[in-house]
Image: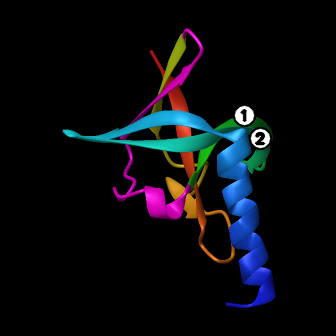
Amino acid sequence: MSLLDDGAAWLAGQLVDHASHAIAYTQGAATISLRGTRDVQRVRVVQASGVQTIVRQVSFVVRSVDMTIAPQRGDQIVETVGASVVRWEVAPEPGGAVWQYESAGEEMMRLFVVEVD
């Protein structure tokens, strides 16, 4: 590993250790517990008609080694913060995939989600 790779891995660990909380990830009958950081971004989407829309995109950033399940559309994430429980469903980003690596060294994954009742 290079010095840059070592630094990226250290920084990913800091994110998980200091800015994440416990989440439950469910796919079918399998559930894993891991730590994730919820992120909200505004993304500009250009439709086929040329109209530009800004959408709110929510995702969770998790450590890749903790994701022992290959993410798929429709998987569920349950986030508990204090007394509040929020349910999310894994869904593709506008025009894209349901997840992507967040770092060049593939230490972190970004899981795209939508809130469900």
| Distance CA(mark 1)–CA(mark 2) | 6 Å
Examine the rendered structure and indicate whether residue 4 appears above or below residue 50. Answer: below
Q: Position of residue 36 (x, y in %)?
A: 58, 43
* Residue at 54% across, 38% down: 113
Indicate the quadrant where residue 96 lies: bottom right
Q: Position of residue 1 (x, y in %)?
A: 67, 90
Secondary structure category for the residue under label 1: strand
- How many C-alpha atoms fall within 10 Å of the one at disc 1: few (<14), some, or many (≥20)? few
Which amino acid, by three-letter code, is at mark 2? Gln
Examine the rendered structure and indicate whether residue 40 appears above or below residue 66. Answer: above
- Specify whether residue 51 is in view: no
Q: Position of residue 9 (x, y in %)?
A: 68, 70
Q: Position of residue 70 (x, y in %)?
A: 36, 59
Indicate the quadrant where residue 27 lies: top left
* Residue at 39% across, 47% down: 73
> Residue 41 got which mark?
2
Q: Are marks 1 and 2 in contact (CB under 8 Å)?
A: yes
* Residue at 37% across, 51% down: 72
In-front residue for pair 85/82: 82
* Residue at 69% across, 76% down: 104
Q: Nearer the viewer, mark 1 or mark 2?
A: 2
Per the image, the residue denoted by label 1 is: 56
Asked if the stretch drawn in magenta spans residue 88, the answer is no
In-front residue for pair 8/87: 8
In-front residue for pair 63/90: 63
Magenta stretch: give its range.
Answer: 63-83
- Specify whether residue 7 is in view: yes
